[in-house]
Image (cartoon, rainbow, N blue to C red):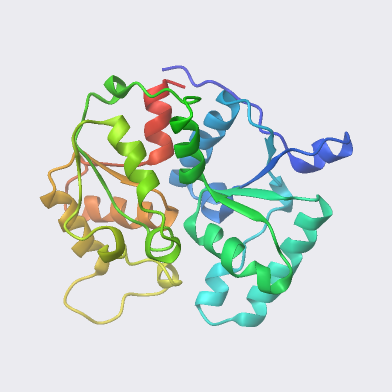
Amino acid sequence: METKKIEIPVMADLFAKGEKPEYLFWVGCAGAFDDRYKKVTRAFAKILTHLNISYAVLGKEESCTGDPARRAGNEMLYQMQALQNIAILNGYEVKKIITICPHCFNIFKNEYTDLGGNYEVINYIQFLDKYIENGSIKIDSSMLGNARITYHDPCYLGRGNDIYAEPRSILKKLTSDFVELERNKSFSFCCGAGGAQMFKEAEPGKKEVFIERTEEVLRSEAKIVATACPFCMTMLTDGLKYKNSEDVKNLDIAELIVQALDL
């Protein structure tokens, strides 16, 4: 299929012309640098363009939110990052932020407020569900062949921010064969990468967390495991490779919607 090129508006360029977009699309470190998650960034940008949403990205001005630093215990580095970001966001008079990373979403929504960063923060899953429900996004489930799909709850979306209904609402419109994992919603099982665990060696134990979760995915007999977090995507993709089960696809919900829309 031919790749359709889209233009991504940059905040500085729009601001120089006196334009202020409604939303800042916060790409995040994984969305900018990780080759796999760049595909999710492109998918969501395609949907924003398809919907004719007024948005922009910071581009080279975007930096890490400081979430990994705070989780790892480096509070000074976190505050330096956060205050720098708040200065840039306030300089552009940003009011609404859309994130594709639950960790960025959580820290903007729940922790930046302590440092004066007050914004309306929207996770992209909530955003997508809203536009599906109001009919702006019309999903053709036949594009996915009604494959069996399961969903892994990211900790920072689910237990952290109580976002359980929206991803399931979307997935049940994408297939008639949606199945839950053994541990789901508030009882879900971590992928093993949160809390800065992504950046350190595994601790002693009988089995790594991501292997345990991958085995649950395989027992569901799903053909697709849907994720909504860059850390979860990395860990489950690695788990499927480790278990020689790469016939099971790990796709982000935004990627599934792009397939259903044939964008």
158 in relation to 80, above or below: above
Residue at point 83% right, 54% down? 91
Residue at point 42% right, 20% down? 262
Left or right: 119 as drawn, with respect to 169: right
Q: Position of residue 202 (x, y in %)?
A: 32, 75
- Nearer to me, 17 or 204: 17
Residue at point 71% right, 64% down? 117
- Nearer to me, 142 or 42: 142
> Residue pushed farthest top?
2
Which quarter shows the N terminus? top left
Q: Position of residue 106 (x, y in %)?
A: 53, 62
Residue 209 can be seen in this image: yes
Residue at point 66% right, 81% down? 76
- Nearer to me, 49 or 116: 116
> Residue pushed farthest front?
134
State the image quarter where residue 110 is shown.
bottom right
Q: Position of residue 165 (x, y in %)?
A: 36, 48
Left or right: 194 as drawn, with respect to 242: right
Residue 189 can be seen in this image: no
User: How many numbered marks, from 0 up?
Assistant: 0
Q: Position of residue 141 (x, y in %)?
A: 30, 24
